[in-house]
Image: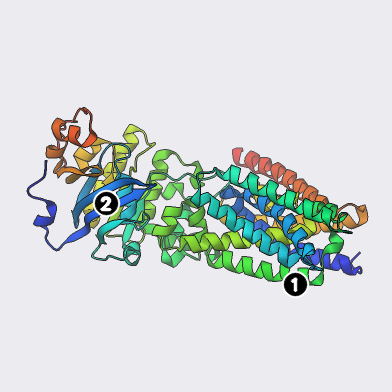
Amino acid sequence: MKAQNSPCCEHAGETAVEVRDLRVSINDRQVLQGVNLSVPHGKVVALIGPNGSGKTTLLRALLGLQPIASGEIKVLGERRIRRVLHRIGYVPQRLVLERSFILSVREFLALRMRSSRNWFWKTRHQIDYLIGEALEEIGVGSLLDRPIAQLSGGQMQRVLIAFSLLEKPELLLLDEPTAGVDQPGEQTFYELIAQVQKKRHLTVVLVSHDLSMVYRHASWIYALNGVICCEGPPERVINEESLKQAFGIHVSPYHHHHHAH
Amino acid sequence: MLTESFMQRALLAALFLGPAAALLGVFVTARRMAFFSDTIAHAALAGIALGFWFGFFNPTFPMIIFSLVVAAAMMWLKSNTDLLTDTIMALLLSGSVALGIVILSLLEGRRGDLHRYLFGDILAVSWMDVGFAGALLVAVGGVVFTRLSDLTLLTANEDLAHVCGGSVARLNYLFVVGLTVTVAMSIRLLGIILVTALLVIPPAAARNLSCNLRQQIVFSIMLGLAGSVGGAMLSYPLEVPCGPAIVLTCIALFCLSLVGKWQLARRAFR
């Protein structure tokens, strides 16, 4: 199934992410075999697909973390991604930290801000002042003194979101952000993302395996399996036929009657 | 004790190397690189032996070069083969030790040196080594504190470090070079077998007393300084080798830090 009214047509010249015929090989395996993708400014776009379908590889390529074989990537109008990294927020799948590494949440957040990169020599009040906005918006104020390695899954994701939002990014890339978070935590997390996205008019690219959350929060979906199998608004992509095409097996679609967008 | 010239050299070397190793150690332990530094230390034996073989009187320079070669080999094998990191390290560690022992046993008059390098020899510290150690402390301290945010992010998550604009590969190499030179230089004092202790014990003890990374770094430097200088000073009147004295002093400090941790926990509980 190919969507007729692709989002790039509605917002010509306003794409935040543009991918043309992207090919990526890892260990001689072609993970991405000619991917085309277009994300308009201010939209929440989700990438879904089975394990090994290249979702994370695609997201890493957008960040310049993954060498590409051929094709073209333009992020925020720039081909040299390093130049726009400061305008991108990134939330990794999870942060695995040695328990011996006693980095506090306050210190971790200070690492993101250019103004607080010399955090070692600043007082806690100075750091709190610099990172203050994220504390209020995301509500991580009570966690500041906690070692980051000892946070629960949900708390960790909140801190990672706060971290990614600190330099006021225009584009937010989320890689399975709720892996290891329980169901209520997951819902809260996506509600928080939706709230921040609306307030700041952020562009969000989200990799997720959770079709119900994607259904509720994404405005456009790309189903990936080496190539883009289908794309469109959630109600069109999340149905039995197109999921079978993308995932290769029978997957029950999630029907939700209160579409958020 | 302080009037003895060799003791002055040893104490100064301990004064410079203890804090440098303890500072790097905070990141070595967090990045699980203790075995890596152990491999570097053992590789130094082959470097020392090769230095003597090629006629160097002071083997510091060939020791550092050979350790750097082994560190580079480790990183290359890690990224270009499917071998597990542990396997690569065990291979290079045993290979270097075997090569070092074979060369030393072939060299007339050097067979007795093995013991000195395995367990450290305070008499072997030259003024050149002291100068080197001082420069090393300045370099390690300078790089770690100017690039502290990048190094901390790299330790937490490489992808995040990249996204935040850090030059991940360059910093990684810089860290490995700093670690390799620090380990190789510390062998004079602690010996090949015990040198990793100076990287691991002070940060571990500091961890017991700290609530955040800044505290861990500060305490680790202080404990590394106290352990190395204290151990070197104790080794003289007790007439014991310097390396084991430093390690045991560090362990005593670690035990004290455990007591401190329990006291802090009890106070917090009340």
Q: Chain of mark 2?
A: A
SS at badge 2:
helix
SS at badge 1:
helix
Q: Is residue A86 at least partly visible in the picture?
A: yes
When the figure is inspected, residue A239 is found, relative to residue A190, above or below; the finding is above
Instruction: Point out residue A143 in the picture as x, y percentages from the top left corner.
Output: 45, 47
Q: Name the residue type under label 2.
A: Val
Instruction: Point out residue B43 in the picture as x, y percentages from the top left corner.
Output: 69, 54
Dot 2 crowding, Cα within 10 Å, few <14, some 14–19, many 20+? some
> In the figure, is residue B202 to the left or right of B72?
right
> In the figure, is residue A112 to the left or right of B174?
left
**Colour pattern of the rendering:** rainbow
| Dot label at residue B12 | none
| Dot label at residue B131 | 1
Quadrant the N terminus of chain A occupies = top left
Q: Which residue is mark 2?
A: A196
Residue drawn at the location 24% of the way across and 56% of the way down:
A202
Dot 1 crowding, Cα within 10 Å, few <14, some 14–19, many 20+? some
